[in-house]
Amino acid sequence: MFNDQRLEDVDAWLAIFGQAGLPVLRHSVAEIARLKEDEDNANGRVLAGVILHDPLLTIRVLAYIEENRRKRQTTDITTIDRAIMMIGIVPFFKAFHGLPVIEVHLHEHPQALLGLLKAIGRARRAAHWARDWAILRRDMDVDEITLATLLHDIAEMMMWLYAPRLALQFSAMQRDQPTRRSVHIQEEIYGVPLFKLKLALAEAWRLPTLVIQLLDHRQAENPRVRNVKLAVDLARHSANGWTDPALPDDFKAIRDLLHVNQETLVRHLNVGDDAELILALDAPPP
């Protein structure tokens, strides 16, 4: 069930993950059960909201669509709303019944559970920002941007799920060596960079090609990819507080992407009382 050993290549990690079914949040299971009680009147948009609150459930839904797609269907399903339309609400409840639960899976690893929940929280926050920025950019499909952002750190989540001791080692080393590049720590602890593992997982789950492209920061010349990556970066850095030294560069890159000033950007972040702190940090010296 769990792996505590450093592995030398991506395929070895895929083999570990391939033996396990993806658990989902306890809240997701409860919400699906609640909606199922009145399945004849269940709303697809409400159901999509439940799914998009849980990156692991989102992966399960996309993988299910791919496994059950008809041969004549050639168009990828790139949003959860479309996935629900394709599955159907009543068949969805039948297919997603009795799912394994994250909190049960990690009940002997409470610190890893906390780490995973924090990663999921960051993913939600990043997805919210990415969606808002995509609307500002008049993106062709903001739901695709939202989905890709939610799934961006899925490899980290898988480590919390199936290599909890290694994930805790990585977290401690990253905290103790803040100037060291994360990718180097990943290679030391896990044996592979999580960026490569993320793309390999996306291929193994047969996620939509467009979503995989949005997960690949090497295509940063594409403003849609930057939209995703910058939201993820901001969520990760701001989790350390709004005085994190990486934030000024994040803000500049976001302003350049959106063609807005700092005041407009901060307003769209919806950070409440922290807005004044952020603006003060960005103010020029007297």
Image (cartoon, grey):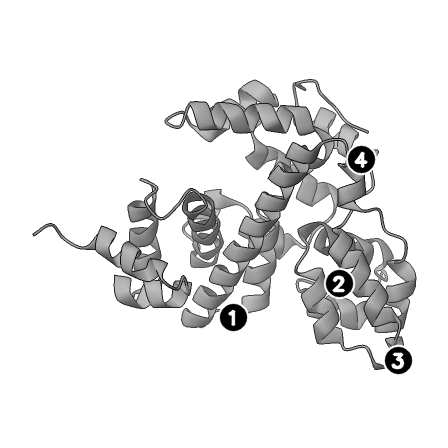
Is any atom of residue 266 visible in this view?
Answer: yes
Viewer-side residue, 161 vs 216: 161
The residue that disc 1 covers is 140
Picture coordinates of residue 126, whole percent (x, y): 51, 55
User: What whole-number distance in Å separates the C-alpha atoms at marks 3 and 4?
Assistant: 35 Å
Give the mark toward the camera: 1 or 2. 1
Give the mark toward the camera: 3 or 4. 3
Quadrant of image for the N terminus: top right
Q: Against 144, is 187 above or below? A: above
First of labels 2, 4 by sequence position? 4
First of labels 2, 3 by sequence position? 3
Residue lying at 25% horizontally and 58% vertically, measured from the top left: 279
The residue that disc 2 covers is 74
User: What whole-number distance in Å separates the C-alpha atoms at marks 2 and 3?
Assistant: 30 Å
User: What whole-number distance in Å separates the C-alpha atoms at marks 1 and 4?
Assistant: 34 Å
Name which residue type carries label 3. Asp
Picture coordinates of residue 131, whole percent (x, y): 51, 65
Residue lying at 85% horizontally and 64% vertically, measured from the top left: 33
The residue that disc 3 covers is 40
